[in-house]
Image: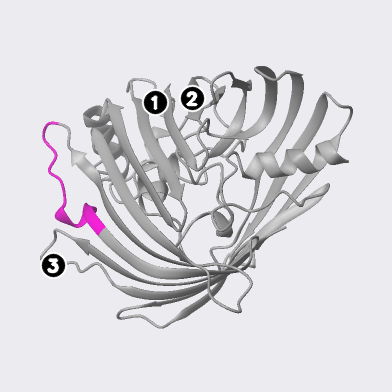
Amino acid sequence: MLLAGCAAAASAQQTPEPAGDAATSRTGPISGYMDFHVNDAQHADPVLDFHRFVLLFTHSFSERVRFVSELELEHAVVSPETDGELELEQAYVDFLISRPFNLRAGMVLAPVGVINERHEPPVFHGVERPFVETLIIPTTWFGAGAGVHGELRGGFRYRAYAMETLDAARFSADEGLREGRQKGAEANGRHVAGTGRVEYVGTPGLVLGASVWSGDTGFAFPRVDTGVTLAEADGRWRVGEFALRGLYAHVFLDGMEDLNRAVTRITGVSPNVAEQMRGFYLEGSYFIVPRPAPREVALFLRYENFDTQYRMPAGFAPLPAFDRDAWILGATWFPDPDVAVKVDYTVLRNRSTVIDGPNSFNVGLGWWF
């Protein structure tokens, strides 16, 4: 039973961090989290959205073989009239061999960035996930795969998988790689991607990480040779009441000139996919311990800069509307380390003189158990 609980915690929280920055590990064979949002954007009616309801089921066959799964319902209802989705984001078996070397196979999360593997509401500030880890790194990014993971001496740990690749025919100028995720749903297996992440956690309060994902993506057009390589580095540091985190991600895409022309011949419209995308964010937060409230309140400010058309292939021009940045100012109250009440104001801008990036006021409630 203890191993099952640890499996659930590990699947969603790869990094132990101070209270207020990570959920605790009080889990059993069933665990989960939820996200409820109120989004009030300029020039639009306010939206109330039960964004995510997630259940994790775990089982230990023995001390060395365990199963972990994650089932997610988005936007409350799955129907043709809504954006609701029901997705199996994780379903894998761990074969625990030794501390530095273990095997994993099934539906896995790509070990890229911070949020993709650790996206419970109490582990990040802001009602919505960072733009960079949504549009540059297509969180939540999951698929069929197998690989190894472990903890090494000196405070290092790693994960490395072979997993299904992306579908380049579904890339876009606005959302980059996001729609190209196959999600383990009868995924095309002509090409296999490689991905890995290394983290340093040997200093209390400090986490440093680097990730890479690389694979061929051109199976939809046999005569078009396309590929994607994503490289990323990130860091998180907390000392006392102060915390910093930052991330930089860069995507290199091969064969996008041929891909854009191939899609245009079929649909009559070019997807205008770039040959490079990039984004970064920096965030600072200050934790207050109010009296007599039992837990923390964190004030935070995050700046994000992201461009899904950073470099274009020959013959294609970037659109200024896709060169964007954002300021997010807000607060997070932790009535319990596993519960987060959030409020923020988001200023979203772009370089277009025609299309405005709408600002928004957002309120959220989330928990993890």
The Cα atoms of the two marked residues, 3 and 2, are separated by 39 Å
Amino acid type, callout 1: Gly
The Cα atoms of the two marked residues, 1 and 2, are separated by 18 Å
Q: Are marks 3 and 2 in contact (CB under 8 Å)?
A: no
**Of pointers 3 and 2, the one earlier in the residue sequence:** 2
Q: Are marks 1 and 3 in contact (CB under 8 Å)?
A: no
User: Which of the colour schemes (rainbow, by chain, secondary structure, one colour) is used?
Assistant: one colour
Amino acid type, callout 2: Thr
Q: Secondary structure at mark 1?
A: loop
Residue found 43% across the figure and 44% down from its top = 236
Is 154 inside the magenta-drawn segment?
Answer: no
Residue found 49% across the figure and 46% down from its top = 115
Residue at image mark 1: 218
Q: Is residue 194 left or right of residue 73?
A: left
The x and y percentages for residue 253 are 29, 29
Q: Which is closer to the viewer, label 3 or label 2? A: 2
Residue at image mark 3: 354
The x and y percentages for residue 264 are 26, 40
Magenta segment range? 314-325
- Using the image as rendered, state which of residue 301 and residue 327 is in the foreground: 301
Residue found 49% across the figure and 21% down from its top = 194
Q: Are marks 1 and 2 in contact (CB under 8 Å)?
A: no
Mark 2 crowd level (few <14, some 14–19, many ≥20, 10 Å Cα): many
Residue at image mark 2: 195
The x and y percentages for residue 369 are 72, 57
Amino acid type, callout 3: Val
Is 324 inside the magenta-drawn segment?
Answer: yes
Residue placed furthest toward the bottom: 45
- Quarter occupied by residue 158: top right
Q: Secondary structure at mark 2?
A: strand
Q: Is residue 67 left or right of residue 203?
A: right
